[in-house]
Image: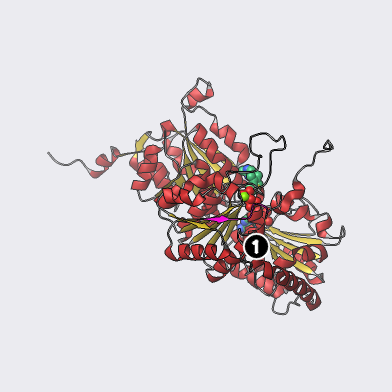
Amino acid sequence: MSAPPAEKANEHELTDGFHLVIDALKLNGVRTIYGVPGIPITDFGRMAQGAGIRVISFRHEQNAGNAAAIAGYLTKKPGVCLTVSAPGFLNGLTALANATTNCFPMILISGSSEREIVDLQQGDYEEMDQLAIARPLCKAAFRVLHAADIGIGVARAIRAAVSGRPGGVYLDLPAKLFPQAMDAEAGAKSLVKVIDAAPAQIPAPSAIKRALDLLKSAKRPLIILGKGAAYAQADEAIRAFVEKSGAPFLPMSMAKGLLPDLHPQSAGAARSTVLKDADVVVMVGARLNWLLSHGKGKTWGEPGSKKFIQIDIEPKEMDSNIEIAAPVVGDIGSCISALLDGMGAHWPAAPADWMNAVVARRDDNIAKMAPRLMNNRSPMDYHGALGRLRTIIKERPDAILINEGANTLDLARGIIDMYKPRKRLDVGTWGVMGIGMGYSIAAAIETGKPVLAVVGDSAFGFSGIEIETICRYNLPVCVVVFNNNGIYRGTDVNPAGGEDPATTVFVKDARYDKMMEAFGGAGVHATTPDELSRAVNAAMDSGRPTLVNAVIDPMAGTESGRIGALNPQSVVKKK
Ligand code: ADP
Ligand code: TPW
Ligand code: MG
């Protein structure tokens, strides 16, 4: 018998949904998936791993989702999170919404139950109309019903996540899609390799001219760098722009290190002065939201005392809170390059008396803080502990700092200087607790650099179980839990005097270090700044998963850290 002709054999070669999704992701450069297995995506995860995609299995989808989101931020490519249906999907959804809020590109892929049963609400296993629920919480939401559409579905998800203002995208893959078979050759042809997923958006020359005219007229200019600027990876151009302008710059928390915090033009330690006194403010990838008092009020000095230039890829961001005199819409790389070109070789630097005044204030504030950072008190206060961690980051500027909590967050942000772009990852626009371990895991995996997570004891609790994941993948993550026995302070008492503890306090003198030991990592109990410093240095040298239980004075913190004023106050007088 003769062998059948090659075309004939191919005719019978089949592929299916499992393989097509994997092939589509691989074709588009997805190298890592963060997720939790279960029906209907257990085999998909196995097959993806078998096909050479790195599949990182978490203990809770929210942490996997946070990992995917920050992977997107760090790489400018959508981070992918994979979950099961209904409850797994909902667990991942918080992270998807958070990614969207923070403008991080991410794709949440969830398996879903049988459409026919879900839509008639007949009580399927993990029944939920996931697509409808996801839609208002992300940039775009798609469902793929036919294997032949997988290529297009994945391509749309990738484009939606990274083009324009980045954000979260939901991709719904019903269980029935995975085993759906189709001709292998037709399947391969149906896949789409996305070309130029985030096209450059060039600003109009007239917008550049308007912005430069305004900047040139400034007597007291200020440049505010946000995490959009850090995300854009236009580091050299941004630095050149800031230096050419001669203006002080103020980094938002995740933009710290885009230019080093010790740069001569840094106004980080003169924040209130520059916000109040500047006359022209250049916003680069930062929104005038609550974190900047919406661009108005006491923080910003006399009403009408300043004009704004805003660089952002999202046109609707302009005038969102206050009037923007010079909107520059485009991607930050293109906008900054165009501004630099327009400034030419002889741009007059900002008036020296302004920069000198800012530097004087900054250096004064830094000098006032310095002695507090050197204290060796036990139990530690935030300053004593953070002073040591500040030195550690100075000596290890490549390390990535993850930071969450209230006092632990606000004080670390002010005290720990950053030296390189995208090295500080924190609670972002929502001030959300629970990003700690997910961000730590993805930061270690995506960058290969050591990670130092500085987290409040409450903050840590939201994702703490993922230290098992850190140990399982043997990641170079050192977690420092600032243990002050509770939320803000560990000293509250139950106002009713009953037996229940106060709502903000935890088990006294808990030993979080023992949790790490349970999974084979190193646990250290540190009661002094010296001990803390030794433990963290040893962890960073060894690269071994480590948790340092840093004992912080329960009296040291303040309610809500630096944002206590946002707490509503009762109008009813206490009897
Ligand atoms: P921060 O919290 O640091 O102040 P925000 O998250 O409020 O920063 O603002 C980030 C801004 O950056 C968003 O308005 C977003 O549209 C914008 N952005 C993100 N990526 C880019 C980019 N590549 N080019 C231009 N703007 C961008
Ligand atoms: C998802 C509210 C803001 S800060 C915080 C909570 C619970 C914990 C502060 O205590 P911690 O830090 O971490 O011990 P410290 O140093 O001040 O003691 N749920 C979510 N997000 C937020 N922001 C909260 C609750 C909150
Ligand atoms: Mg605490």
In this rendered view, identify the residue nearer to me: 162 or 299.
299
Residue in the picture at 36% in, 47% down = 49
Q: Position of residue 165 (x, y in %)?
A: 62, 51
Q: Quadrant of the N terminus?
A: top left
Residue extending farthest bottom: 346
For label 1, the SS is helix
Residue drawn at x 53%, y 52% as measured from the top left: 439
Ligand 1's quadrant: bottom right
- On the image, the x and y values in percent for residue 207 come to 74, 62
10 Å neighbourhood of mark 1: few (<14), some, or many (≥20)?
many
Residue lying furthest left: 1
Q: Is residue 571 left or right of residue 424?
A: right
Instruction: Residue type at mark 1: give it.
Output: His
- Quarter holding the C terminus is top right
Percent of width and height locating residue 312? 68, 57
Query: Is residue 27 visible to the viewer in this orientation of the structure?
Result: no
Q: Nearer the viewer, residue 148 or 452?
A: 452
Quadrant in which residue 16 is drawn? top left
The answer to whether residue 326 is magenta is no
Q: Position of residue 521 (x, y in %)?
A: 42, 54
Q: Say whether residue 445 is left or right of residue 354.
A: left
**Total numbered labels:** 1
Instruction: Name the foreground residue: 241 vs 33.
Output: 33
- The answer to whether 464 is drawn above or below residue 304 in the figure is above
* Boundaries of the magenta span: 548-555
Pointer 1 residue: 383
